[in-house]
Image (cartoon, helix red, strand yellow):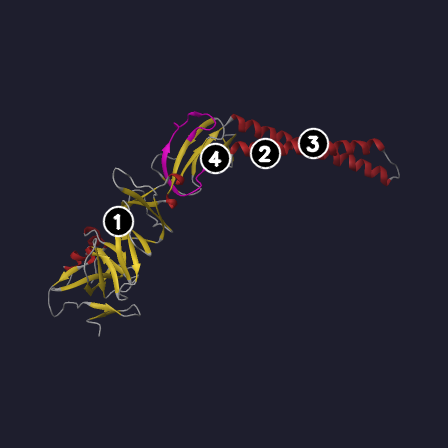
Amino acid sequence: MKADAHARHISGMKIEEVPAAGLALTHSLYGHLFVPGHALETYSLPCGGRISLQVKSAQNVKKGDVLYSVVAPEVSALVADIRKQEAAITRCSEEIDSVSQRLARLKAAGTSNSDLEEQINFKNAEKRQLQRELEVTRTRLNILVMGAEIKPENGLPTLVVRANNDGIVRNVGITQGSWGEQGAAVVTMSNLAAMEVEGTLYGNDVPDFTTIRATRLSGRDNAVMQGTWRMAEQVDEEKQTRAFYFTPEALPADARPGQLCRVDFYTDGGDKGMVTIPDSALVKVGIDDVVFLEVAEGTFAMVKVQAGTSRRGMTPVKGLVPGQKLVVKGGYELRYLLPADGSQQKKAGHFHADGKFHEGEDH
């Protein structure tokens, strides 16, 4: 059966990947994506200057995007010094070349000139000194700008500060066009790639588990995330809870702080033919328990399953293959897309090990 994009949107359809088989669910908790303190990055002024902001609060930013630029007198002075020193080195080199050519012509004529040789030695020493001074000035400038890019704008050397990572602008601390002193915080960014799931466990009730996965319950698809976890060492005496954190290996592209997630804890040794799915995926058709699978974009197949006992909003079932795209919300609406004519009605089906769908019972 098919359901167009409008129908899927109206029904609020959500898709979730079927988890691995042979795992027994021991616990589930709900939490939210959040940005931990270590993932906040503040961009401060490397030196005093006038700021031109290129972003605003709550704006999505990509790595390399310009956050702000600064016109700083101290930078302008150092850039001017560098240009003067470079010009002095160029003049010194030209003088050395000129004197060397004169000396070479005299030597070709069989005449030596100690004064010219002394001038060359003196100029070489002067050039080395100028090069050392230039290196010191460049180092001072690099330290001052702290890696910011220097570009000419309106005839003035301007610092351009870019985002180090993808993220969201959490705060802008300076008014557009204002003067800021060295060290003033200009933009605070949330590094979205470092988001974690935060939930709570009750007291010392730590579930027994060997496998853990988190499912982001926002967007069209309930994206499954693998990762690592940690727990707070201390129990909150008042609430008798402790914080639990799940750090995803990778996040969905549209992940944002505050999105709801479910964290599932499993142990090994479950029925090898069983997978555990959300109760919301199960639909009654007559006396049968069925689910709907997305087999292609906008195309769905009804599959009869054998359901076990529900626990914590999750039910173990037989008849599914790990990795299939399971409709966990919107299946009830899909049921009404079934043909009303019994002779035309599509049969429930099953999947073989090769991943192909077949109507009817599995014999």
Q: Is residue 76 left or right of residue 356?
A: right
Instruction: Tell me the kind of residue under disc 1.
Output: Leu
Marks 2,4: beta carbons within 8 A = no
**Mark 3 or mark 1, earlier in chain:** 1
Marks 3,1: beta carbons within 8 A = no
**Mark 3 or mark 2, earlier in chain:** 3
Residue 178 painted magenta: yes
Q: Which mark identifies residue 160?
A: 4
Q: CA gap, disc 1 to disc 4?
A: 44 Å
Q: Residue at coordinates 61% horizontally, 31% vertically from top-left?
A: 83
Q: CA gap, disc 3 to disc 4?
A: 31 Å
Q: What kind of element bears circle 2?
A: helix
Crowd tier of the residue under label 2, counting other residues whose Cα lies within 10 Å: few below 14, some 14–19, many 20 or above = few
**Mark 3 or mark 4, earlier in chain:** 3
Crowd tier of the residue under label 3, counting other residues whose Cα lies within 10 Å: few below 14, some 14–19, many 20 or above = few
Nearest to the observer: residue 303 or residue 275: 275
Q: Residue at coordinates 28% horizontally, 69% vertically from top-left?
A: 356
Q: What kind of element bears circle 3?
A: helix
Reading the image, the residue beneath label 1 is 29
| Magenta-highlighted residues | 159-185
Reading the image, the residue beneath label 3 is 129
Q: Which mark identifies residue 139?
A: 2
Mark 2 or mark 4, whichever is nearer to me: 2
Crowd tier of the residue under label 1, counting other residues whose Cα lies within 10 Å: few below 14, some 14–19, many 20 or above = some
Q: Position of residue 256 (x, y in %)?
A: 32, 44
Q: Position of residue 136 (x, y in %)?
A: 62, 32
